[in-house]
Image (cartoon, grey):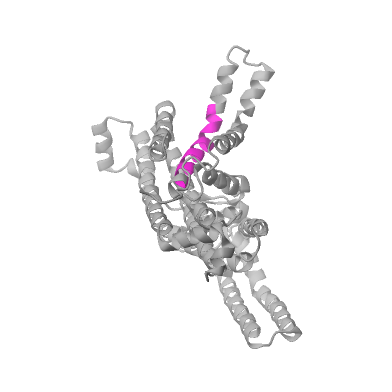
Amino acid sequence: MTETNRPYILYGIAALLLLANWYFLGLNSALFTLNFCLISAVMALGVNIQWGYAGLFNVGIMGFTAIGGLCAVLVAYPPIQETWEAGGSGVIISALLLLVAVAVCVVIYRRMPKGSARMWALTAAVIVSFFIIRHFYAPAVAAIESTNAASTGFLGGLGLPIILSWMVGGVVAAGIAWIVGKIALGLRSDYLAIATLGISEIIVAIVKNEEWLNRGVKNVIGLPRPVPFEVNLQKEQWFIDLASRLDVNLVEFSSIFVKLCYTCLFAFVLLLILYLSEKALNSPWGRMMRAIRDNEVSANAMGKNVTRRHLQVFILGSAVVGIAGAMLTTLDGQFTPTSYQPLRFTFLIWVMVIVGGSGNNWGAVLGGIVIGFFWLQAEPIGIWLMDSLTASMADDNPLRLHLIESAAHMRLIVMGLILLLVLRFSPRGLIPERTGRRH
């Protein structure tokens, strides 16, 4: 396998995995797996922009994914009139007062000379602002969360098309990344990892506990879709005629059709981001970023503003992760804050980038597809494997029952095994970063 044909062979193997899923589990399962893999590939591209381009060790991927999911709720969910009447005005007043407080603190910081007087003035402004804002915020939140708490208990969103939330998720994630970058990007790589992980946990804690914003751990279900609902398709005459001509089951075909629509949308976003990422990587900006990654001291000596460039790439990568987070919530049709765990939305994405090949966009996409596939299919494969190995045992055999029940943990074993094998036999990833001059 040469460096030239390696990507084609590996992508062909990935396609065979998806075709095998289709053959053994059906087209519905294969399309669901493909959609998850496409979103995972987008997330992997975002992390590759940060790590592969600039060497930034961001362990806060989970937080930016949650920001994207939250934006899907705030953009697409219809506004809830009764909760707005109960406490919406108080929340708006609190937000305006917060902006005023930030402006006052900025003026104090810039206008007053450095010293203890400025520190005490800032402290006083923060304390006074806290109590004033809380005076309006606390009763408003209590009124919102107590209004029909079983089914709503939050303000809802703007009622706009959910596909707009993908762009909004990227913009908001980029804004949060700017704030985080201003605070943390001056730190050494290990301290940067700790800081981003801590900030990510803060974001997820807010999402879990601020019920007035997104119902917290009660979850938001029934989000709008960018594609038709299956039950609506089954009532459309053109769709009924199409199913008849194809001689397929109407209900199953409607599910397949919806998943195909999702596939087209996700594939378009992935290809667009991949195209832009490739253009950026092969541009003078991309070469400069790799020079900074390889030797910050030399780049700094040549007059490059290393911190500023790190901030740029940190914002870009976080924006891509935010887009993927909104896409994933759109696919799920619900927002579940408790699902945002570091294992799935930080460790797993890093495995995708490492396995695929950091610094290579095509490698990151391949890693997203391969690891996403095995993350979903390792459990059913494990159950089938354990069932086959213990077929000669009695159905009530304790060892057989234990092995089948433990098959759910196969995905963790498979992830670790894939990572170990790749690091042993291809330490730079399945599709390594291209170095040297291309002919």
The vertical placement of 313 against 95, above or below, is above
Q: Position of residue 192 (x, y in %)?
A: 64, 59
Give the side of residue 16 with respect to residue 305, left or right: left
Is 374 part of what is drawn in magenta? yes
Q: Is residue 16 left or right of residue 215?
A: left
Which image quadrant for residue 305? Answer: bottom right
Looking at the image, residue 202 lies above or below residue 98: above
From this viewpoint, is residue 352 visible?
Answer: yes
Q: Is residue 169 left or right of residue 389?
A: left
The quarter holding residue 384 reads top right
**x, y percent for residue 386:** 59, 22
Q: Main secondary structure of the magenta part?
A: helix
> Which residues are the magenta region?
364-381
Where 436 sits versus 122, above or below?
above
- Dividing the picture into quadrants, the one containing residue 247 is top left
Residue 80 visible in image: no
Q: Who is closer to the viewer here, 194 or 248?
A: 194
Measured as percent of width and height from the top left, residue 245 is found at 23, 33
Number of marks: 0
Closer to the camera in the image, 10 or 301: 301
Q: Which residue is located at x 51 percent, y 42 percent?
A: 429
The reply to whether the magenta stretch includes residue 405 is no
Q: Quadrant of the N terminus?
A: top left
